[in-house]
Image: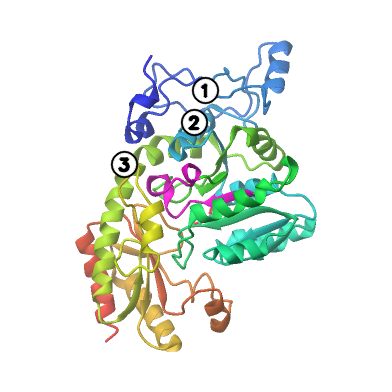
Amino acid sequence: MASNDAYRDRSVLIHGKFKSEKWDFQDHIIPPITTAVSFRLRSAERGAAGFQQFANPEVDRNTAEPIYIYDRLDEPCCGLLEESLAFAEKGESAVVYSTGMAAIAAALGIHTRSGDHIIHHPAIYGCTHGHLKNWLTRYQITSSAVDLKSGEALLASIQPETRVVYFETPCNPTMEVIDIEQVVRIVADENEKRGDDNKIVTIVDNTFASPFAQRPIEMGVDFVVHSLTKHIGGFGATMGGVVIGPRSAETSLLLYRKDFGGSISPDAAWHILTYGLPTLAVRLEKQQATAQETAEFLEGHPNVEQVIYPGLESFEQKEIAARQMRDIDGDPAPGAMISFVLKGDDHQAFERAKTLINSIADSSLSITLAVSLGQIRTLIEHPSSMTHAPVPIEDQKLAGINPGAVRLSIGLEDPRDIISDLSKALDQLG
Ligand SMILES: *Cc1c(COP(=O)(O)O)cnc(C)c1O
């Protein structure tokens, strides 16, 4: 029988596993969607077997024929998507959730209890910050923002209660890059001194890079989380999230989903499985090439102070990015996200950024003013006046948010149109 090992990642992501136990779809090129909430169990004995099998560490979900019971527990499209996502991230096991935030809550939730401590890089997704500060604190789970670009800072911040080191790379919206192997090394040294019941786990939110451009588990990270709503879904039409990690965590991740209820809908799983993952490589390759061209154009524009893109010679952490951001063929993969800063003092740059995005909102077809990222449409936003507007400019700067910084998520439009629309809007700034 053919095995996936004989094929390149691009081909496997289009077809999925050669033979899956999740669904008998020998005659279906595309897996069907089920809209049944519950499944016929045929006998009390088979029903009992289904409950016994669910989230059972003794049962290998890759080879066991599943007994579906109720959609919140498991269903075929969700299972097929999990097989493909584990493959894409080179992890042992994947568990899919309704949104990226549901996945992040699960990844943190299964590793912490009252009294525990989490270390995270200061620049993280806003709702992840909200989850840590507004909700986990209710259970006496504390967290510290530590600049994980510094190995010394990480080492100094580890407490006996620390259970998780959490970060994004590249970060939102600063585009800083964290040296994954350095964090893994420091945590591994600390874990040498600890017993099995209090090891620290590393969790990377790999949403910005996507598994096309970076696979942290191959670099020793324990868990990867994604918002499937972004690059992996790719079309901005469905939400989802995933946690990928060792098989030993699978039971807890499934039980967390069952008991907190953040299950993905079969329809969303089917969309990501049918449209998102199969086109990930071809979309990202094109989007990344356009991002490189756009970043180079922006860097040459007289109204632009700075462009932050891992593919530029001027990128401060170029070596780290070149080492860990590699596509599935091993070539450098700086991704499709760009941040650029307009000229002027803080106040001028802030006003100019607002003028720029307003003029794009008024007259650009190829660039859309909207939050989110990783879609086939190019999206622009101004973090300082939009997502972070309630925070005073001085505090924004402390958090690394430049008042004149604009974020671009490059899509599949013709690069000449994107550059021409940016050029018109930038020239107007005078
Ligand atoms: C969007 C996003 C999330 C949250 O994902 P949802 O699917 O919106 O819940 C988490 N992390 C990053 C980096 C994101 O961009």
Amino acid identity at mark 3? Asp
The magenta segment is: 201-219
Badge 3 crowding class, 10 Å Cα cut-off, few under 14, some 14 to 19, many 20 or more, is few
Magenta stretch containing residue 180, yes or no? no
Estimate the x, y position of residue 244 in percent, counting from the top left.
Answer: 55, 40
Is there CB contact under 8 Å for labels 1 and 2? yes
The one nearer the camera, 303 or 200, is 200
Cα distance between the residues tagged 1 and 2: 9 Å
Cα distance between the residues tagged 3 and 2: 21 Å
Can I make out residue 321 in this image? yes
Q: Nearer the viewer, mark 3 or mark 1?
A: 3
Magenta stretch containing residue 213, yes or no? yes
From the viewer's perspective, tell me whether residue 145 is left or right of residue 1.
Answer: right
The one nearer the camera, 393 or 354, is 393
Badge 2 crowding class, 10 Å Cα cut-off, few under 14, some 14 to 19, many 20 or more, is many
Identify the residue at image location x=80%, y=53%: 114
Q: Nearer the viewer, mark 1 or mark 2?
A: 2
Circle on res. 329? 3
Cα distance between the residues tagged 3 and 1: 29 Å
Lower position in the chain sequence, tag 3 or tag 2: 2
From the viewer's perspective, tell me whether residue 419 is left or right of residue 5.
Answer: left
Circle 1 SS class: loop
From the viewer's perspective, tell me whether residue 113 is left or right of residue 356.
Answer: right
Circle on res. 83? 2
Amino acid identity at mark 1? Lys
Q: Is residue 74 above or below residue 145?
A: above
Circle on res. 22? 1
Q: Is residue 204 above or below residue 268?
A: below
